[in-house]
């Protein structure tokens, strides 16, 4: 029934209530839309306190609609990054330098959740359409 589904969805949002929010600080589409080629990779920068996250978004192949994300975290390095999108999520590990790669990611809204070890709450980005 409808009310049960709504209650379940509302309860699901509480699983990240302790997460810190990383806001979008820069977007290459907004910063230089008039001078950038339409097929150039998009750069997104998120910040939250001492943590910065830079993500390159590009097509996986020429003419393909799926996206490839390549990113690097500056600051405390998370163990893994969860890419959340309309069709579900994709979790990938980070390397010793805080870098990660995730593909394929469908076009549409995405949010990234950085998961740290040691009981530190996750860092979650705002949603961005890619």
Image (spheres, grey):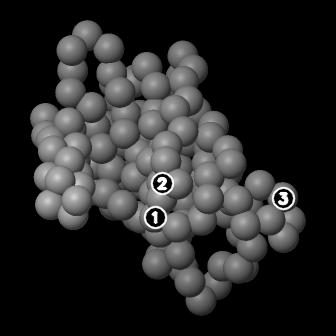
- The residue where tag 1 is placed is 109
Q: Secondary structure at mark 3?
A: loop
- The residue where tag 2 is placed is 85
Mark nearer the N terminus (1 vs 2): 2
Q: Left or right: 103 with respect to 3?
A: right
**CA–CA distance between discs 1 and 2?**
6 Å
Q: Which residue ends up furthest to the bottom in the rendered image? A: 34
Query: Which residue is at 62% across, 59% downward?
Result: 106
- The residue where tag 3 is placed is 61
Task: Count neighbours of disc 1 (C-alpha within 10 A) and say few if under 14, some if 14 to 19, many if 20 or more.
Answer: few
Q: Is residue 72 visible?
A: no
**CA–CA distance between discs 1 and 3?**
20 Å
Q: Left or right: 46 with respect to 89?
A: left
Q: Secondary structure at mark 2?
A: strand
Depth check: give the residue in front, 19 or 15: 15
- Residues at marks 1 and 2 touching, judged by CB atoms closer than 8 Å: yes
Task: Count neighbours of disc 2 (C-alpha within 10 A) and say few if under 14, some if 14 to 19, many if 20 or more.
Answer: many
Q: Please, is residue 42 above or below residue 9 in the view?
A: below
For the N terminus, the image quarter is: bottom left
* Number of marks present in the image shown: 3
């Amino acid at each position: 029934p409808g009310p049960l589904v709504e209650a379940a969805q509302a309860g699901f949002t509480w699983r990240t209530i302790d997460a810190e929010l990383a806001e979008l600080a820069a977007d290459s589409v907004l910063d230089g839309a008039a001078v950038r080629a339409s097929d150039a990779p998009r750069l997104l920068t998120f910040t939250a306190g001492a943590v910065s996250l830079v993500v390159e978004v590009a097509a996986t192949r020429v003419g393909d609609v799926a996206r490839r994300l390549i990113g690097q975290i500056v600051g405390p390095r998370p163990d893994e990054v969860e890419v959340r999108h309309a069709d579900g999520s994709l979790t990938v590990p980070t390397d010793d330098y805080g870098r990660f790669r995730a593909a394929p990611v469908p076009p549409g809204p995405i949010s990234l959740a950085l998961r740290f070890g040691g009981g530190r709450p996750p860092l979650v980005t705002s949603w961005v359409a890619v």
